[in-house]
Image: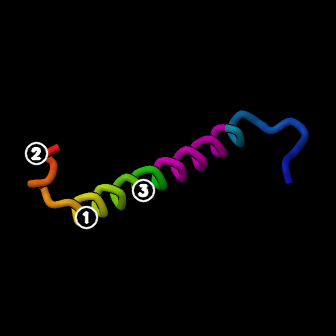
Amino acid sequence: MFSPIPSPTEIILLVVKFGCNVGACVIIFMLVDYLVESMRTPRDDERHQ
């Protein structure tokens, strides 16, 4: 598992991996949400609100 005192490079690698995973998930979620919204509501409906 983890060594008692992780080296700075290990911490940086973990942060980079975690950040990339979270970033990819957020981007994918935003894209899916945008596509669902654009499919569900035609553009004309937004003007009436």
Q: What secondary structure prevails in the magenta region?
A: helix
Q: Residue at x 28, y 58 (%)?
A: 37
User: In the rendered structure, which segment of residues is drawn in magenta?
Assistant: 12-23
The spot of residue 3 in percent (x, y) is 87, 45
Q: Quadrant of the N terminus?
A: bottom right
* Outermost residue, bottom side: 39
Q: Give whichever of 30, 24 is nearer the camera.
A: 30
The spot of residue 6 in percent (x, y) is 80, 38
Q: Give whichever of 22, 44 is nearer the camera.
A: 44
Distance from label 1 to label 2 (Cα)?
15 Å
Identify residue type, mark 3.
Phe
Q: Tell me which numbered mark, 1 or 2, is placed earlier along the sequence.
A: 1
- The nearer-to-camera label among 1 and 3 is 1
Secondary structure under the numbered disc 3 in the rendered image: helix
Q: Residue at x 84, y 48 (%)?
A: 2
Q: Is residue 10 left or right of residue 16?
A: right
Q: Which mark is residue 47?
A: 2
Q: Tell me which numbered mark, 1 or 3, is placed earlier along the sequence.
A: 3
Q: Which mark is residue 40?
A: 1
